[in-house]
Amino acid sequence: MGKTILDLNLDIKKLHSIANSLASDLKKMDIHTVADLLWYFPGRYDDLSNIKLVKDIDENEVNTVCVKITKIKSYRAWRAKMIITELIAEDDSGTVEAIWFRQKFISQILKIGDQVYLSGKIKAKKSSWQFISPSYEKAKADLIHSGRIVPLYHLSGQITQKQLRFLISKALKEITPVDDPLPVEILNKEKYPWLMESLKQIHFPSDQKSLEAASQRLKFQELFYLQIKYQLAKKNYQSQPTYQISLNNHLLNQNIKTLPFKLTLDQQKALYDVLADLNKDIPMNRLIEGDVGSGKTIVAILSALNVLSHGLQVALMAPTEILANQHLATIKKILPAKYLPQIALLTKSHQLLADGTNTNKTELIKKIASGSINFVVGTHSLIQDKINFKKLGLIIIDEQHRFGVRQRKTLKEKNKDHKAPHLLSMTATPIPRTLALTLYGDLDISLIKEKPAGRKKIKTFLVPEKKRLDAYNFIREKIQNKEQVFVICPLIDDSDKLGVRSVTAEYQKLNKDIFPDLEIRLLHGKLKSDAKEKIMSDFKNNQFPILVATSVIEVGVDIPQATIMIIESAERFGLSQLHQFRGRIGRNALDSFCLLFTNDISSVSKKRLEALCTTSDGFKLADLDLELRGSGEIFGHKQSGLIKLKIAKLSETALIKKAQKWAQDILTDQKYLARHDLQATIAKLKNETHLE
């Protein structure tokens, strides 16, 4: 029989009987085909390439020796009632022993006279050395488990490292050679190895230099494909017909003059960016990124006013009903009175006209379709329900970090004249520039960093446990002055995704032991929408002083009298999350305080939390979190899975910029676009471009 040639798309079960027997565990690791297996990269490596003589063994290190077996046996230990396997082996410089527990099969694999590599920690035993449960491999030309840089993978179920290495090694040997998908110009200019060589070296590196080269190439390829997808999404959206909305300068200036505050320079710049986009004949796709309390919503509402003045419709989507209600209240304060009859709220629980009149869902949907309601505020149900617009000119999305291709297509289909609406997204999560390039590669970005005048800095303290009682006494004093308190609790573990256990325990402690005489309410994700809304409404109206809440639900409603925030187990949150929580207080002229409690006194945690105490710049804090903890912490629990990268990291700024530059060059240069190989790659990526 000839050598089997494997196709990348071959079902993993057909690779080998081991893969077939472990198919369910491989599936848990998202390995379904040979390609999935080869793109399942090591999490780390053990460098076992330094092969020593027995006489040179060091007791404090992992040692690798190549020795000849002189004795091996398995027996049942009388007391422990387990199988023990012992081995004695030697090289020209000395003798070593090895012992394994509950691994009888080793004495069936290894035989006297075999040359074998042993790797592991070692301890002195009388006149010789003894390995305890070392890794082992018979000496041969193609080592994969020892005597080299050995890959270590994240595993699931019953799969062992040896089994996974064996399957990957087999696939690499028998795979059909594949054409490199990257243009040769990239490979030559960046000095990257070819794909097949990179796959071999990432799994079984010849040396550290080859491993680094393979790693850089595969990281680049992943980021390059991501950037191609973003550029294609942007190009596709901008090719749609849209509304060209000119600037209504007189109306906007009149409205801005009536505001009870002056727009900051950053707000003016962001507003200019949006109005300039609206005046183009391609659909806007812009993100306003601004710190908590920086005034993003005002910019969005003024932009909406410009659209409404042209007889077009606006939809504002918020992540929760609580925030949708808050936005409606803000809109009613800012827009000229003549527009109020055109404004409505549509959520799962409420269908209201701006004047407070209740209506029913069916009637409201009819008014939106006919164009008599021109500004509708709601949750994501605005695009999921049977709602159609007459002329939807602008969609405003609040805190929706990834509004994708499929959702954009849905919006266009909801427009009676099939024009693509302009899209304006807002986020209060400060994102380092490098992350923004990756997460929002298809968006134009406006930054609002300047805070409105008159905002006091929130005083933030890392409170030692011994000072907890003092903190509670301080809180009681503030409550006597009619000030209010947020208490934020983290998730205990992944199974408690709504944080119910920790928040309930904290509520009971405060209610029974600390403030038994005060009314305390509890807010978490398992409560129904009506109950949440009632609690937040009562809190806003200062009907009770302390709200204990989880971190996984939106607590962004504006509470003017909230001046204190306690954050329990603060080390469990990313700095950007903590900064966002902190921004829920200090929305008045009173002094505000954020008190951080932690049980973790590690140097990294202390550095992070001390940074929060000294810095009020959310962008600096996000940069620090990226440096110390990685990209998953920028967004916290809800958004950590936004981009699932296999090998690249979002903190690799230079590589991201390089990938973005190449993606732009490839998609704008005819010499590349005319090539059949690139056309196939681009077509494949186009089909995968669902970034929601």
Image (spheres, rainbow, N blue to C red):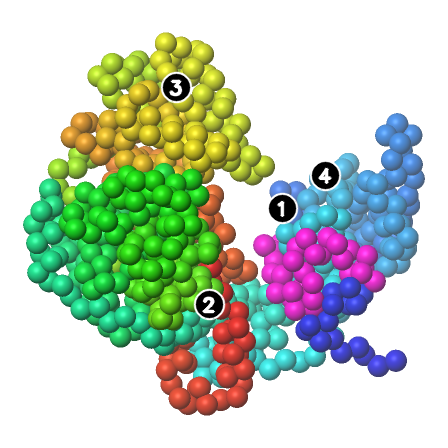
Residue denoted by label 2:
226
Q: Amino acid at mark 4?
A: Ala
Q: Residue at x 28, y 23 (%)?
A: 542
Name the residue that disc number 3 marks: 520
Q: Is residue 111 left or right of residue 142?
A: right
> Which callout, 4 or 3, points at the residue further toward the start of the chain?
4
The answer to whether residue 186 is above or below residue 329 is: below
Q: Which badge, 4 or 1, is on the more N-terminal residue? A: 1
Report the label total: 4
Q: Position of residue 20 (x, y in %)?
A: 80, 60
The residue to which callout 1 is attached is 61
Q: Earlier in the sequence, mark 3 or mark 1?
A: 1
* Distance CA(mark 2)–CA(mark 1): 41 Å
Separation (CA) of disc 4 from disc 3:
62 Å
Category of crowding for the residue at label 3, using alpha-carbon neighbours closer than 10 angstroms: few (below 14), some (14–19), many (at least 20): some
Assign a secondary structure to mark 2: helix
Q: CA distance from mark 3 to mark 2?
A: 47 Å
What x and y, as percent, mark residue 327?
A: 29, 44
- Residue tagged by mark 4? 124
